[in-house]
Amino acid sequence: MNVLNFVHAFFSDGAHWQGYDGIPTRLGEHAGYTLEALALAAAVGLPVGLLTGHYGRGGNALSMVATAGRALPTFGLLVLMTLLLGFGMLPVMIPLVVLAVPPILVTTYEAVRSVDPSPVDAARGMGMRESGILFRVELPVALPLILGGLRSAAIQIVSTATIAAYVSLGGLGRYIVDGLYQRNYEKVVGGATLTAVMALATLAVFWAVARVAVSPGVRRGDPKN
């Protein structure tokens, strides 16, 4: 059988659409892992990136942290955390958050630093507070790039959250791990296909968010929109 036959066989099997191992259940679990890891990574990366970008300090340190975070092997970190903390959600969240923080952190910093200094200086000259300058002047202009960093992090999490299945959790990785163990390649291909589709859906969601959240004037100035 070729890959397309495996895909057709997986999705046409009614047993894969119901029960605790059904596609809706596994998609919900995978989405839950993704949203939780993305929220935690954003809670760390966004404030640090915004503040360092606004004050223009710490760029080299952020670059070093991002490089170190990207260099860490996600699966190896999962194994280490599981040995230290035991089975559960925490050992899965740690490597996913470590994976997602660097693109959010670095992109947010660069987005704020790339804002035209003229309106920033004008706002400062008018006596606006630093918090007002950051959130009312810099953030609206930097938002497209910031959303790009969040999008990149979300796609990486979606693609990597399959590791949860290796520590007895659910998600789409359950099909891949169980399929390999059972030599059921229909399951393996189905799980991989669902992961790819979910990554594409994530792209679509962030595109829609950008269309709503970014002001038309900023969008017109962004060649990517």
Image (cartoon, rainbow, N blue to C red):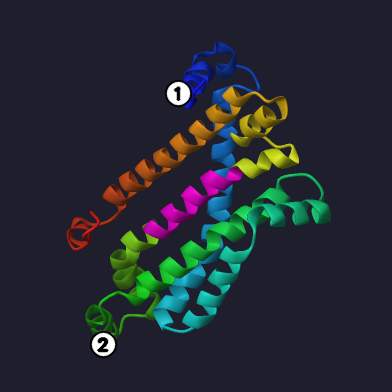
Across and down, in percent, residue 60 comes to: 50, 82
Q: Which of marks 1 and 2 is in front?
A: 1
Above or below: residue 205 compared with residue 38: above
State yes or no: residue 203 in magenta: no
Mark 1, residues whose alpha carbon is within 10 Å: few (<14), some, or many (≥20)? few
Q: Residue at x 28, y 67 (%)?
A: 141
Across and down, in percent, residue 204 comes to: 35, 41
Q: How far apart are marks 1 and 2 (CA)?
A: 63 Å
Q: Which of marks 2 and 1 precedes in the sequence?
A: 1
Q: Quadrant of the C terminus?
A: bottom left
Q: What element carries label 2?
A: helix
In the foreground, 75 or 42: 75
Tell me the chief SS of the magenta region.
Answer: helix
Which residue lies under the disc numbered 1?
4
* Left or right of residue 152: residue 38: right
Magenta segment range?
148-161
Residue 167 placement: quadrant: top right
